[in-house]
Amino acid sequence: MVGKSNFNKESINKKNTNVAIKYLDFSAQEELDDLDYREEEILLLVIEDYIKYGVPVSSLQLVDRHNLKWSSATIRSVLSDLSEKRYLFAPHRSAGKIPTPKAYRYYIKKLPIDLPPFKPSKEKQNIIQREFLCRKFEIPGVIESSCNILSILTNYIGIAIPPIPEKTILRHIELIDVGSEEILMVLLTRSGTVYSRIIHVDERIPRNILEQISKFLNENFSGMDLTEIYQLLTTGNISPVGEMYRYASMIMNTISLYFKTLDDMHDVIITGVDRFFEEIGLREDIHIDIASIYNLKEFFREILIKSIDMEDIVVSIEGDRNPQLFGLSILTGSYSMGDKKIGAMGVVGPNRMNYKSVIQVIEYIRLMISNMITKLNR
């Protein structure tokens, strides 16, 4: 295992170029209208101006800020049409327009596929390095540090899940006789996590048979993830022969049931909550408090797990899916060990955020830690 002394600034400057990113919103419950060229251009300008300035956008402001070929009256008419289609709303009768969650979904789908890579300044590189060096350089510490770095670099809430068990690669399995009808099963994964469980059996199994079954399991399953092992165990395509057979089927059935429930054994890491609420202050577009963030752990976990198998950065505009998350968006991306995706991380921030910048940061951090985790487990 790589020690702390092997970490240096080269670890945070790994190749991060030509990144192709798509944007998904698996929470949308409504179809997005087809907009014509003029409607789309004006809508995207309203969203970008609102993200930048944080105040309602009027037709006069659009004319003043952008070299548009349409008159203020024409733009005002288009803004009215976009309001009828529920892309914009006016907080007051005489105010300008503000994007709705539906508008942000449209904006996300229209972002460019290719973004330049995030290039941290020297100051930010030092922040990243200090955060990693203050923790033990093992996978749990790497994930927690990465989550905190995401929060520091964006000023939003960092969220992450450690390598989920069903995506974890088995390194070694050992069956140990600990009583008349009990066996201790110990699983060592390639990520360094150890799982153990007492298996209850109908009769005592000779130690030499347990050793043979352990050897059989290691020969057949070492290097596979736990999902693959579970599928092989339940299909019965791999079965021991000879003296082992009498006992092995009973043990393997018990192990398969254990693998099926392992995915409930990991928690969601949440960082930077205080930092986020300090940053946003009292904003009318966000109706959530600190306690509610922690009460939503299972909700975040569901989204993080969904994003593990996706190549892309997943953007979820949650305003009208979960009332507690009104005004908030969740951006997540997977990380890997070698070519196998094993976990995910991201941020929770306001709908009014610089999506391009945040996506670049998430992409940079997830590629960096994928490289680190892969090296840790060679």
Image (cartoon, grey):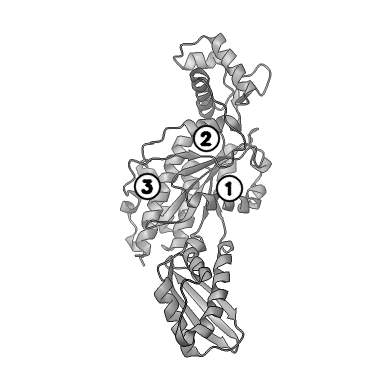
The structure residue drawn at horizontal position 47% and vertical position 56%, both measured from the top left corner, is 143
Cα distance in 3D space between marks 2 and 1: 16 Å
Residue 125 bears which disc, if any? Answer: 3
- Disc nearer the start of the sequence (2/1): 1
- Disc nearer the start of the sequence (3/2): 3
Q: Nearer the viewer, residue 341 or 371?
A: 341
| Neighbour tally class for label 2: few under 14, some 14-19, many 20 plus, Cα within 10 Å | some
Q: Is residue 142 visible?
A: yes
- Disc nearer the start of the sequence (3/1): 3
Amino acid beneath label 1: Val
Residue 273 bears which disc, if any? Answer: 1
The image shows residue 8, relative to residue 223, as above or below, that is: above
The image shows residue 362, relative to residue 6, as above or below, that is: above
The structure residue drawn at horizontal position 47% and vertical position 51%, both measured from the top left corner, is 309
Q: Nearer the viewer, mark 2 or mark 1?
A: 2
Q: Which of the image's four quarters has the C terminus?
A: bottom left
Picture coordinates of residue 281, whole percent (x, y) = 61, 37
Provide the secondary structure element on which disc 3 rests: helix
Q: Is residue 135 visible?
A: no
The image shows residue 75, relative to residue 145, as above or below, that is: above
| Neighbour tally class for label 1: few under 14, some 14-19, many 20 plus, Cα within 10 Å | many
Provide the secondary structure element on which disc 1 rests: helix
Cα distance in 3D space between marks 3 and 1: 22 Å
| Neighbour tally class for label 3: few under 14, some 14-19, many 20 plus, Cα within 10 Å | some
Amino acid beneath label 2: Met
- Mark 2 and mark 1 in contact? Answer it, CB < 8 Å: no
Q: Nearer the viewer, mark 3 or mark 2?
A: 2
Cα distance in 3D space between marks 3 and 2: 23 Å
Picture coordinates of residue 92, whole percent (x, y) = 68, 21
- Mark 3 and mark 2 in contact? Answer it, CB < 8 Å: no
The residue that label 2 is drawn on is 353
Picture coordinates of residue 249, whole percent (x, y) = 53, 79
